[in-house]
Amino acid sequence: MAKRLMIPWHKDLKVPNKSQNCKEVLGSFHSEKKYLLLSGNRASGKTTLGWVYILMMAARRPRTTIVWARSEYSSIIDSSLESLVKHILKYGLQDKRNPFIFKTRPSRLLFKNGSKIILMGLRDIEKIKGVEPLIVVIDEASREKTVETFITIAGSQVGGRAGKWMTSSGQYFNQIIMLTNPSSKGHWIWKLYHDKQSMDDQQDELDEDGQQIQDLLKQDYIEKKDFLWLDFKLNDNPAYSPDGVHINDQGNQALNGLKATHPRGVFYDRYVDGIWCSAEGQVYRIQEENILSLSQITKRWGGLPTNVGWDLRRACDWGADHPSICLWIGLHKLTGDKLVYKEWRKTQADIDEIGLNIKAESKGQLITRTVIDHRKDMQRMLRKHGIPAIFATKGEGSVTEGIILVNAALRRAQEGKPGGLYIYDRAVCNRDPNPVTLTRPRSLIQEMETLEYDPNPKSDKPNKVGDDASDAVRYDYLADNNLDEDIYIEPMLI
Ligand SMILES: Nc1ncnc2c1ncn2[C@@H]1O[C@H](COP(=O)(O)OP(=O)(O)OP(=O)(O)O)[C@@H](O)[C@H]1O
Ligand SMILES: [Mg+2]
């Protein structure tokens, strides 16, 4: 077990040593667990524990190099660093005993004892070879789509030290700690930890990841005993459990929050229950309650959205062989309900035709926001027509995140709760005469009724046919969700 912590914690940070899982992680250096995997539902405290562990290691062991990595560097700044700042540095930086120095950019934490924590995006992972870290933490590890990164890190440590790593009584010991929510059982992380036996059985069917994993596990520097898989639950989060076993009021509140924001289905199983399972079947859980006729709309809100009482927005997705789409979405100011009240879609449309149509269909409407698929030329074109547009959130995890948000809103509508998502059944305002439309969904509603996940268990992605308007809906929800200001940390020396 770890000794007493010596970092000046934020006063709200509870020292995570009560639950068995926390003890395993904090003591993993001594128990010589080389490859730790922390899997668990949302808010089970994995990321915070990861920070606590590496800060503790860095502060205790002079001249220790640690890497904190995520798929995209920018997401470290957006999210991981935020939790670090929230819990630890805000308090610590004002404290004279604080062992951190923040140097010029928030990509490195330098310690007075010569230790450092380097924040790194996994796209630059080759750089790790020159860094030779004692510990690499990969946050949101399942966002890595192939085992390649793991192999690079595991191999580079070995390369640096000719396959030798020393125990806690010696000096060096390299550790890779991965933090993740559950994903599909086809994911390389699951295979790496669980599937050796079954992979041996079905040699010929191994895919590329499977083959690479098998080759890796044959290396003499990798041994099964070095792997430890830990399943995290809310009781592992010290904020939610006083004793590491029972959940307190705050924990129950967190659980209810998770339940309310995750519709039943694969993401509920993963993010609320912490189960590894495949995304399969229908992507959007649309039901008849979500589809409204004009008379139903009139009964509910007195008519289609107008400039009064509604916030009107647009969301666009661009295609060539696929249709380009513009949706008009009303956000009801009192109930938070959203109604997709107009849909323009055209396959192989001319760029200016798109702009002119969007403008014409928006006549008289006070549009407060237009969020679009990333394309600079389209943004320029819209600006030419007097329409300022922001880009949709992209990046690893954003598809899943958007699907969860949209499904949660669909469900609120089905349960009659505020904040629901509704679609006008006659929203489509134009004809798209292109012959390919005969075989494809011709409206947002048809898309949502038919879109299924790619059956490949690794991919977790919707099939790429007919997800155009539903992509635009996702953009609108993701844009709502990303209102937080970017955090910026003033460089400071202590
Ligand atoms: N030791 C702690 N003391 C106080 N609060 C904590 C502690 N650990 C976690 N929390 C709080 O619990 C919440 C969830 O923690 P954290 O983000 O670490 O969980 P996670 O398992 O990484 O979640 P996700 O799966 O969503 O990434 C955070 O808001 C954090 O403030
Ligand atoms: Mg986390």
Image (cartoon, grey):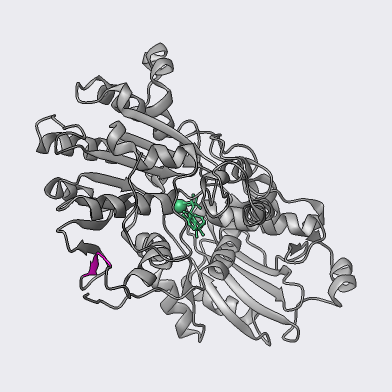
Asked if the magenta segment contains residue 100, the reply would be yes
Q: Main secondary structure of the magenta part?
A: strand
Instruction: For residue 316, say whether it is visible.
Output: yes
Q: Nearer the viewer, residue 273 or 368?
A: 273
Relative to 21, is 6 above or below? below
Residue at x 19%, y 46% (from the top left corner)? 133
Relative to 385, is 27 above or below? above
Residue at x 19%, y 32% (from the top left corner)? 167
Span colored in magenta:
98-102
Residue at x 43%, y 16% (from the top left corner)? 198
Lateral position of residue 89 relative to residue 475, left or right: left
Instruction: For residue 459, say whether it is visible.
Output: no
Q: Nearer the viewer, residue 436 or 398?
A: 398
Residue 208 position by quadrant? top left
Residue 15, given in percent of the width and then of the height, sits at 44, 53
Q: Quadrant of the N terminus?
A: top left
